Amino acid sequence: MLAAAERTVQPVDVATKIAMTMRQMGVVGLPRNYEIFYEICTGSNEELWNEVRALGPRPTQVQLDNIGRKFFASTNGSSVVDQARDVIATKIEEVMALLRRERSSLEKYGSILDTTSSGLNPNITQDILLRIVGIMSAATENTLEQGRQIASSIEDKSAELEKVKSTLEEYKKLADTDPLTHIWNRRAFDKELARIYDTEKGRMFNALIIADIDRFKEFNDRHGHPVGDRILQLVAQMIQENAGPGMFVARTGGEEFAIIAEGLSEDGISRIAEEIRMAVEAAPFTNSETGVNFGPVTLSLGICMASEATGPEDLYVKADRALYASKVSGRNQVARHSALVDGKSRKNWFIYRKD
């Protein structure tokens, strides 16, 4: 079992390669696009690369989304949810059919009462009266029995409906959960990122942190994917624990994670990012059985306040730009987008550095 630490250096950082490839092809820096180009740039999916290459030098977002739905199961969660919704709709229609039968039965019963009551006149004989009583008694008994059967059927359908609804909720959760780390996935992240700009309050009081494990491809190549997967699980756990309650933590693809924080100043966000960075750096990533040390493992992090961006895509791009600044400045540090050179005003980069 693993414990924690840094990674090894590779000649060309995979994050840089992904960013350059996407820029060359004119691809917008959306999380779902990063997922596609991570697979391409790491060489782990040749079929995916062939399909993207077939789109030409300037693929459209619609074309990329179609490829994403084909190759990544997490993007297909909506179809599973839609199927569950169809089942719910069917069960509801079955319940409505039962209620319509009940109504029809009551209407028939009312018709019998009307018909028999019309025969009640001063000249009615005892024989006719007994016959009417028999008809009404039989109709009443049939109606009551029909009602009991329908009530029982509705109860059964309601139980089935609750089961389907529970399954639907589970599908929703699975569709939004990363299967390896069990935190939120890219699909859930995209929705949460878009939600920030639904209100002015969201824009003013939210921030995005993007964290990337340094030199993860080289680490994976040296120790193997099973160890790499375990490292991802442990890092995800440490990010979630150190981000604190109320923070939205997701794995957005490969070795990249994102934290959406609400209600904190930029200084407060930076402190959280630094606590995450230090926790990962200090954790011993070792095999408890063999004593092999897989570390050290470190994170580079970039921060952007939602108020600095015009929308979710712009927020992600700017946080990613800050992450890139952390990488090119030596890795294992936190950079703020607000401190980067923007071409108009020159500011000193505000970067937390390891002593």
Image: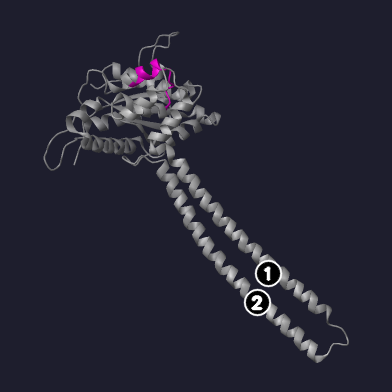
Is 196 in front, or is 178? Answer: 178
How far is the residue under mark 1 from the one under mark 2?
A: 9 Å
Nearer-N-terminus badge (1/2): 1
State the residue position of label 2. Answer: 142
Is 152 in front, or is 177? Answer: 152
Instruction: Give neighbour class at mark 2: few <14, some 14-19, many 20+ (Cα, 10 Å).
Output: some
Quadrant housing the N terminus: top left
**Element type at marker 2?**
helix
Q: Residue at x 38, y 22 (%)?
A: 53
Q: Is residue 29 magenta?
A: yes
Q: Is residue 6 visible?
A: no
Task: Name which quarter of the figure residue 343 lies in.
Answer: top left
State the residue position of label 1. Answer: 105
Region in magenta: 18-30
Question: Looking at this rendering, what residue extends furthest in the right direction?
Answer: 122
Q: Is residue 141 magenta?
A: no
**Element type at marker 1?**
helix
Which residue type does callout 2 highlight?
A: Asn
Mark 1–mark 2 CB contact (< 8 Å): yes
Which residue type does callout 1 highlight?
A: Ser
Is 244 in front, or is 296? Answer: 296
Q: Does 307 sit left or right of 286 as displayed?
A: right
Q: Residue at x 31, y 36 (%)?
A: 236
Is 70 drawn above or below residue 122 in the view shown?
A: above
